[in-house]
Amino acid sequence: MVYDLERGCQDYQMPKTAPAANPVFFRTYSNQEISSVSRSTANPEHKQRQEAAVEALMQPVNAKVQDLLRLSRTLSNTDPRTENITVPLAHYQGGIILESLGREGPSFRADDVNRTISLNRETAINLVRMVPKEWRVYALLVFLFHDVAHSPQGLKHHEDVRRLKITHESFGQERMGELDLRNDFLAVHTISLYGTLKECKAYNHRNYIARFYLIWNEVCGSMLDAFPPAQRKDKQQRVFGFLLMSNLINDAHLEKRPLEFEGEMWPVWDESLSHLSILSNGHILHPGSPVDSQLMAQIIGLISANQYREAAFGIKQVW
Ligand SMILES: [Zn+2]
C-alpha cells in the first residue's frame, strides 16, 4: 500500500514509518545481507516474483503521473522549473513501461515513435528492494522524473552521456554528477510541490518541507545505500551534496529553521581541501569559503567508506 501523502494539510502528519531523526536514511546493508539478496535473485521463481511485484507498481505510477500532469499548469506557475519534468512526461503519452535493458544498460529509454518511456526493469527491481514498501511508488517516480529531466539538458539518450564523457572524461563526469544531483532535487521538489498543491489547494511551505524531508530521506537516502562506495571525486561530490542537503532539510523540518536551498547544492573543493564552494542551479551560491582541511579529508574518507551518518555529522561542522 502506498502511504497517502495527500491526507491532512496544516496538521500534516508523518507516516508511522517516518524516522525520528533519520535512521532509515543511514541504514546500511551488511555484506551478508547484500550477498543473500544476490543469491536469492539467482532463483528463477524468486526473480519472477520480484518482476511481478515491480510490474504491479506501474499502474499506480502511471496514474500518479497522469494526475500530476493535470496540475502541470499550476505547478509551472508555482515554479517553471517543474516543466523540465512535466513537458517531457506530457510528450510520452504512450505510457511508462518496464523493459529489459540489461544490468549494465541505460536506466531508461525514450521511444519517440510509440511515445513511451521505458524504465530499466533490472534497475527498477534493485531500487524497489532498497526502499521501504510504502515508498516504492515514490521511488519509481523519483527514478522516472530524474531521468526525464535529463532530456531538456540535452541528454535524452544514454548515448549522449557517453559522448559527453568522451569529450573530456573528468569534465564529463563532474558535469554529469552536478546534473544528477540537480535532477534528484527537481524530482523530489516536483513531487513535493504536486503533493502540497493538491492537498492544500495552494502552496504551503511547511507542508512542502515535510514532504521533501520524507522523500529525500526515505526514498533517495535508501537509494544512496545501494550505491557502491564512492571512490571517484565526482561521486564523492554527489554524496557530499546529497548529505549537505539532507542536513539542511532535516534542520528545516525538525527544527523549523528556514530552508536554505532552492536547488541542488553542488560542492567544489580544491586539491588542498582548504576551500569549499557551493554551486546551485549552475550559479555560484557560495564562492570559496575557507574550511578545515583535516575535517574535509575525514569527511571524504567517510564518504568513500559508505559511513554516511558520520560524514553528515562532519559536514554539519563544516557548513
Ligand atoms: Zn542521471
Image (cartoon, rainbow, N blue to C red):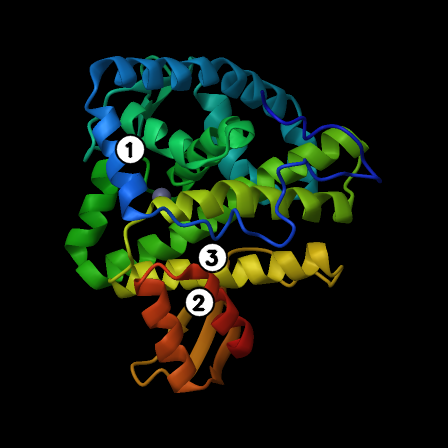
Relative to residue 72, is residue 29 depicted above or below?
Answer: below
Residue type, numbered disc 2: Ala
Disc 1 vs disc 2: Cβ atoms closer than 8 Å?
A: no
Front residue of this view, candidates 67 and 23: 23
Determine the quadrant in which ligand 1 lies: top left
Relative to residue 167, is residue 140 depicted above or below?
Answer: above
Residue type, numbered disc 1: Val
Q: Which residue is mark 2?
A: 311
For the residue labelled by badge 3, is the local secondary structure a helix, a strand or a loop? helix
Query: Which quadrant of the view contains residue 50?
Result: top left
Which badge, 3 or 2, is on the more N-terminal residue?
3
User: Quick check: can you spot residue 206?
Assistant: yes
Relative to residue 119, is residue 234 depicted above or below?
Answer: below
For the residue labelled by badge 1, is the local secondary structure a helix, a strand or a loop? helix
Residue type, numbered disc 3: Phe
Q: Which residue is mark 1?
A: 37
Characterize the local packing of mark 3: few (<14), some (14-19) or many (20 or more) Cα atoms within 10 angstroms.
many
Q: Quadrant of the C terminus?
A: bottom right
Q: Which residue is mark 3?
A: 242
What residue appears at the point 54 percent right and 42 percent down from the top-left corner?
Answer: 218
- Separation (CA) of disc 1 from disc 3: 26 Å
Instruction: Return the x and y of residue 248 as percentages of the image width and height.
Output: 61, 62
182 left or right, relative to 1: left
- Which numbered mark, 3 or 2, is in the foreground of this view? 2
Which badge, 1 or 2, is on the more N-terminal residue?
1
